[in-house]
Every structure is written in C-alpha cells, then in structure tokens.
Image: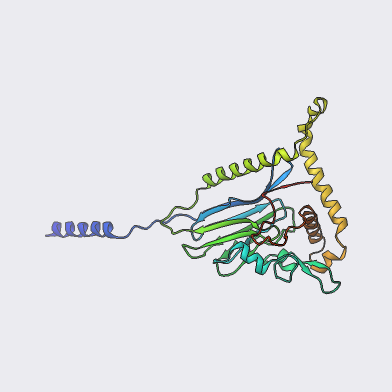
C-alpha cells in the first residue's frame, strides 16, 4: 500500500509538470544605440540612429551615446515623427520643442530651453538610474553638457506597441523605431544589429567619399593619410570657434546653462548655417537633412 501511494504521488507530480504552462525567465538586455557617427575615410557624419529599428522586450534598456550634437527623444506610443514635429517642434514657432522660437523681447529668435534640457534631472545620466519609459509621455535626454551624450532608459511600454526615438535638433528624418514584442517572441540579436549598423555606415561612407574626394598630385598624396585625423579634429574645433563668435554673449546666461550651453548653441548655429532652408515651404514630409552631412 505504501509503495502504491508513492507511485501514485510521483505519477501525479510528473503529470502536473507536463501540464503546467512553460515559463521562461530571461535576463533583461541592454542595447547600445549610437546617435550619428563621424565616418572614417570621409569628412562627414552619418545622420542616423544605429540601429534604425529594434525589437525589445519589456524591461530591456536602451543606452544612447553620441559624440555629435544630438538628442534621444522618445515619443509617446502612437505619435508619428512627422506629425509630432509639425505640432510640437516646428522651427521658428512657439512650439515647446522648437529649437528656434520667436523672442518677443527683440523681435528675433531665441533657443528653446525645453528642447535642450533633459525631461528629468534625476534619471538617465551615467551616475543615475535609467529613466523608465512606459509609452504614455515623452522622455528626452536633452543635449549633454559635456562632449558626449550618455543616456539610458528602460522600456516598460505595453507589449505589442511601437514608438519612435528622434533627434529634436535634426528633425523627423533622424529617427529610430522601437517595437515592444511579447516575451514569447525573439527580441533583436545584438550581433545582427551590429552587422546592420556596419552595413549602413559603409553605405554612408561610400556615398560621402565621392563628394569630397580631391585628386592630389603624386608628390602630395604620400603622407596625406597620416594627417587626415588631425585635419578632421582641427576643422571641427575651428568650426566651434567660429560659431562661438557668432553667438551673442547673453545667450548662455538667458538660457541658464552658462558656458556649456553657449558652446552647444554655437554648434547648433553652425549646423544651421550648414543646412539653409532646413524647413522649406511644402516640405511637409520632413525632408530636413540627408543621412550624411559633410563636415566643414
């Protein structure tokens, strides 16, 4: 009788194990997202989010980094990039995220504090916990005070939803789509994303190189490669110095972030000069800039 009871108990336990729904506990993934990249072999910047599209699970984290002048702005679920810019970030209007807004004091334009500052000062930065994005409201990295952007946010938006990440400074063409998939579905493989990023960068490099290639005389060609890196750095610093001279001294004090913001606004002014007519009449599809922007 004792043996029979033990056998029945073991059989019942095994049956429960077979019929019980399978559960899989997988660790959350942190995905690296690069915003823009200065190209090797061509004096230009790839104006992309890398990757441009990604599938994630709830609880995964997006870590954004950039050495350019960009933002990581997560739009609420359901907001399309073009429509959002048209209603919330139209340059030259009083939209809250418009980079340039009318200045009633002198009749000219001023830089938008809301567009340049982060949505929260308590999360997202390297020494802080990641921000939490549930899809209901916007989260913005702002422009970094230091040279590089370093911002993290954990995705808790509903499964089956999608949202966009944009750069407030460069418009709806510079964007990334994030799809929140069910736990039973595979999320993006970081290795596959890295391969896609490399292919996109190679495409941008190939398209940028013919624009700036110059045939050097044979006696100048030798050694040019060794100077290329120094030349790029020098051009970038000279551009910043020229831009600083063009920004009114009171800009930094008025926007409240002093020298760091003054330098960043100077870079933005320089970028604006590089892209005249970035919002032309009839350009409602958001054709603000090419994927590759030459550096001068």
Which residue sits furthest front? 282
Q: Which corner quadrant holds the N terminus?
A: bottom left
Location of residue 6 (image quadrant): bottom left
Q: What colour scheme has been applied to the protein in the rendered image? A: rainbow
247 over 219 or under it: above or below? below
Left or right of 27 on screen, residue 251: right
Residue 161 x/y as whole percent: 49, 63
Q: Residue at x 43, y 58 (%)?
A: 183
Check the image and name the residue furthest to the top: 219
| Number of numbered discs overlaid on the protein picture | 0
Image location of residue 69, percent across then percent down: 72, 55
Where residue 3 sits in the image (x, y, percent)? 14, 56
Question: Between 46 and 256, which is closer to the camera in this rendering?
Answer: 46
**In this orientation, which residue lies closer to the viewer: 145 or 271?**
271
Depicted 200 relative to depicted 251: above or below? above
Horizontal placement of 263 versus 72: left or right? right
Q: Is residue 249 left or right of residue 205?
A: right
Image spot of residue 289 (x, y percent): 70, 53
Residue located 74% across and 53% down the image? 147
Between 116 and 27, the one lying in front of the other is 116
Q: Residue at x 88, y 63 (%)?
A: 249
Of the pair 19 and 181, the residue shown nearer to us: 181
Q: Quadrant of residue 280?
A: bottom right
**Residue most extreme to the left:** 1
Identify which residue is drawn at 79% across, 65% down: 257
């Amino acid at each position: 009788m004792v043996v029979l009871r033990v056998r029945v108990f073991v059989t019942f336990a095994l049956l429960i194990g077979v019929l019980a729904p399978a559960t899989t506990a997988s660790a959350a993934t942190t995905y690296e997202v690069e915003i823009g990249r200065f190209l090797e072999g061509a004096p230009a910047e790839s104006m992309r989010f890398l990757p441009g599209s990604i599938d994630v699970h709830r609880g995964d984290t997006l870590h954004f980094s950039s050495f350019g002048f960009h933002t990581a702005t997560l739009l609420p679920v359901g907001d399309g990039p073009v429509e959002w810019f048209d209603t919330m970030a139209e340059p030259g209007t009083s939209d809250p995220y418009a980079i340039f807004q009318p200045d009633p004091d002198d009749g000219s334009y001023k830089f938008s504090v809301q567009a340049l500052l982060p949505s929260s000062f308590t999360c997202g930065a390297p020494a802080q916990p990641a921000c939490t994005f549930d899809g209901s409201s916007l989260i913005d990295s702002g422009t970094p005070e230091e040279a590089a952007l370093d911002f993290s946010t954990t995705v808790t938006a509903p499964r089956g939803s999608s949202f966009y990440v944009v750069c407030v400074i460069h418009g709806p063409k510079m964007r990334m789509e994030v799809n929140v998939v069910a736990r039973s579905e595979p999320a993006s493989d970081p290795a596959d994303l890295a391969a896609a990023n490399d292919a996109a960068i190679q495409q941008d490099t190939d398209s940028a190189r013919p624009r700036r290639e110059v045939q050097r005389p044979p006696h100048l060609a030798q050694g040019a490669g060794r100077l290329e890196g120094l030349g790029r750095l020098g051009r970038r610093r000279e551009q910043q110095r020229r831009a600083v001279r063009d920004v009114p001294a009171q800009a930094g004090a008025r926007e409240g972030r002093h020298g760091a913001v003054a330098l960043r606004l100077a870079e933005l002014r320089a970028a604006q000069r590089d892209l005249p007519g970035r919002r032309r009449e009839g350009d409602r599809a958001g054709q603000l800039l090419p994927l590759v922007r030459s550096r001068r």
